[in-house]
Image (tube, rainbow, N blue to C red):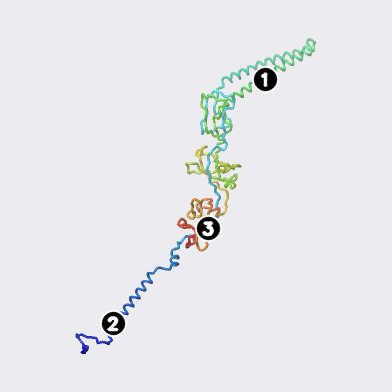
Amino acid sequence: MNYETPHLGNEKVYALPGSSEQPRRWGRIALIAGAVLVVLIAGWMFLRPAPKQAANVQQLPSVTVAIPGRSSVARVVSATGSLAARREMPVGVAGEGGLVTRVLVEPGQWVGAGQVLATVDRSVQQQTAASLSAQISAAKADAGIAQSQYERAQSLVGRGFISKADLEQKAATRDAAVARVRIAQASLAEQQARNGRLDIRAPEAGLVLTRAVEPGQIVSSGSGVLFRMAKAGEMEMRAEVAESELPGISVGTPAQVTPVGSTKSFPGTVWQVSPVVDPTSRRGIARITVAYNKELRPGGFASATITGGTNTAPVLPNSAIQTDASGNFVYVVGSGDKVERRAIKTGEVSDRGVAIVDGITGTEKIVLSAGAFLSPGQKIKPILSKQ
């Protein structure tokens, strides 16, 4: 066979069988294939999913928690109730009554003790009094004659013109005449007292609250209440307090009373705490006395805050407290950073937060926020906050 030998320049070169050119080409192919394989392995390592355990760690929610401790909390009792006169005085007809001639006061007026509120016609009673006065004059005249007769009889006894028996009879006649004078005087005084009771008067100084009588009206002892008064103008709020709150309220406890529709509060003091509890509502009455003010209208509705001492309790922000059909609760971080549901009972609310009177001690880690997105048993990543 003829074989061409390699030439330099532009002449074709033919590899002879068994020459080194063919192994060199296969080496280059192997090198390229290895590089591609390395790239594929690196891409797979980069794109492959992370281990399940590591994914769980990255997905744990970060939640802010705090250890609230215990704080001094003012014991404040909130209550609602009605306003009334502290000592309400109903005024009616004390005498026999009659036709009302004048009404001298209006609701809202201040009156003094014994002041006339209304007058009743007394023309008939005045005539009766005049008759009794005349009877007194007649009885005095009879008594004067009897006294003169007795004195003359005394002078005649010594001369023997009349007996001692006649003298004693004259003395008895005189005494009877004097007694009739006293009877007539007593009758006149009684009638004058009756006439005085025809006037409807204020029993004590105070404020007129209502008026239920007009001139021309016929009144009697059965007419009922004609005026209502507040003694000395003193008002009170009859606050309805839950049975559980009553033991913490005592006489002298300060309070603030706010009438409905007003933003103004009036200072007051508890002057009486009900000794009984309503068996139906399980509430008692705390009576709060307040000074008179035109904005405090008897019969109106009001709210009150009664401050009675202090106690210690954990205080939490509103965001930490959750509520559902079962009541109020918080989430507590337990072992393994898992949240646990803890039922609580709330107390006083202040600018600092809500006092927790039952359910936690204050040493637990409490979830401050995001509680609505958690569920019992869920594992979290707690971040401790300093309140």
Give whichever of 334, 244 is nearer the camera.
334
Q: Are marks 3 and 1 in contact (CB under 8 Å)?
A: no
Residue 109 position (above or below residue 164): below
> Based on the displayed image, in which of its 4 quarters is residue 227 positioned?
top right
Q: Residue 69: where, in percent of width, then height?
A: 54, 58
Mark found first going from the N terminus, 3 or 1:
3
Q: Which of 216 and 102 is in front in this view?
A: 216
Q: Which of marks 2 and 3 is in front?
A: 2
Q: Name the residue under label 3.
A: 68
| Circle 2: element type | helix
Mark 1 crowd level (few <14, some 14–19, many ≥20, 10 Å Cα):
some
- Most foreground residue, 35 or 355: 35
Disc 2 target residue: 25
Q: Is mark 1 on a helix, strand or loop?
A: helix
For this orientation, the residue located farthest to the left is 10
**What's the distance in space between the residues labelled 2 and 3, CA to CA?**
78 Å
**Circle 2 residues within 10 Å: few <14, some 14–19, many ≥20:** few
- Mark 2 vs 1, N-terminal side: 2
Instruction: Pinpoint residue 99: horizontal percent, then vertical percent.
Output: 54, 23
Of the image marks 2 and 3, the number of the one nearer the N terminus: 2
